[in-house]
Amino acid sequence: MIEKHEKWMNFHGRVYKDEVEKSKRLKIFNENVKRIEASNKLNRGFTLGVNAFADLTNEEFRASRTGYKRQSKHFNLKSKSKSFKYENLTNSVSSTMDWRKKGAVTPIKNQEDCGCCWAFSAVASMEGLNQIKTGKLVSLSEQELVDCDTSFDEGCEGGLLDTAFEFIKSHGGLTTEAKYPYMGTDGTCNAKRAAIKSVSIHGHEDVPENNEDALLAAVAHQPVSVGIEGGGFDFQFYAGGVFNGECGTELDHAVAVIGYGVEEKDGSKYWLVKNSWGKEWGEKGYMKIKRGGGAKQGLCGIAMKPSYPI
């Protein structure tokens, strides 16, 4: 295991401050690897892998990599939408959808040790809508949201999707990633950079809660931002396949649903999700989550709080 840990350290460029820290991390790494290997022997339809998070406890991982609605003050939100424009289209959607194939998904990004998944999720659905409307795929700035959207949302300390969309609408849009690059930390709002707006929206709509058919209708027409419970062990080390692992409905992470489909080998229905944990996680940064057949909230609560820009 020591040799395995050394190889892993070299691959991920991990350096520890001293031998005490290294010994502590080796112990955590050892426990995680054993649990990953035990899980994979169960043939659950998806696999776990020894990824960049293998020397973190689940508590450490959750603290740095999630970040959806941590503060109770967010629940005074007045902006909840009443309309749902895809309401009458739930029965007339294609059997599969992958917005990557339509050119509406930017490459996988990495939020790093900053709990601003909410910004990445909101930006991903906005990038998708912009491409659908204009034919141009433009990478937009998460850092502008982290630095400037601070009346409701709190940068690396967490935020909400609806409030992010409200901020974008009220401030005339977002600038590009190139003009306001991602830093992975809370910063001071750079008004000069943020002033050069690239893409604007009229607002947002919420998908009816706990309704996977309604979510399907929305995703058939554009990428959709969702909250999920993504802080568990199975999520931390997901490597591939249709995820059907352990997770509840305590929403703590935000991602973008960029499609859906059916697994050829066993007919499993899934949601196709774009995450913000880098390309080394999951299926090159993406994930398939089991769709339908369970609780109305959807697996990991995926159908509880979906919303999209308009």
Image: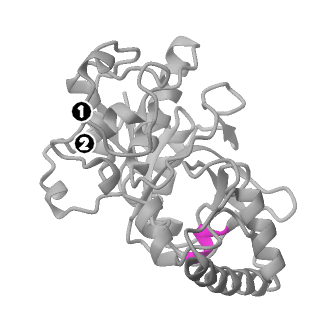
- Direction from residue 261 to residue 232 in the image, left or right: left
Q: Is residue 236 magenta?
A: yes
Quarter of the image for the N terminus: give it.
bottom right
Residues 11 and 178: in front is 11
- Vertical placement of 132 versus 261: above or below? above
- Direction from residue 33 to residue 185 in the image, left or right: left
The magenta-colored residue range is: 233-237
Quadrant housing residue 196: top left
Quarter of the image for the C terminus: give it.
top left
Residue at the image point whose x is 30% and y is 47% from the top? 155
Mark 1 crowdedness (10 Å alpha carbons): few <14, some 14-19, many ≥20: many
Residues 138 and 80: in front is 138
Q: In what element is the residue under mark 1?
A: helix
- Direction from residue 83 to residue 260 in the image, left or right: right
Mark carried by residue 167 = 1
Kind of residue at disc 1: Phe
Instruction: Give percent across and percent down for residue 60.
Output: 47, 72
Mark carried by residue 163 = 2
Kind of residue at disc 2: Thr
Q: How much space separates mark 2 and mark 1, taking CA atoms? A: 6 Å
Quick check: marks 2 and 1 in contact, CB under 8 Å? yes
- Direction from residue 244 to residue 268 in the image, left or right: right
Instruction: Give percent across and percent down for residue 72.
Output: 18, 63
Residue at the image point whose x is 67% and y is 56% from the top? 281
Residues 232 and 296: in front is 232
Quadrant housing residue 108: top right
Mark carried by residue 303 = none
- Vertical placement of 153 versus 165: above or below? below
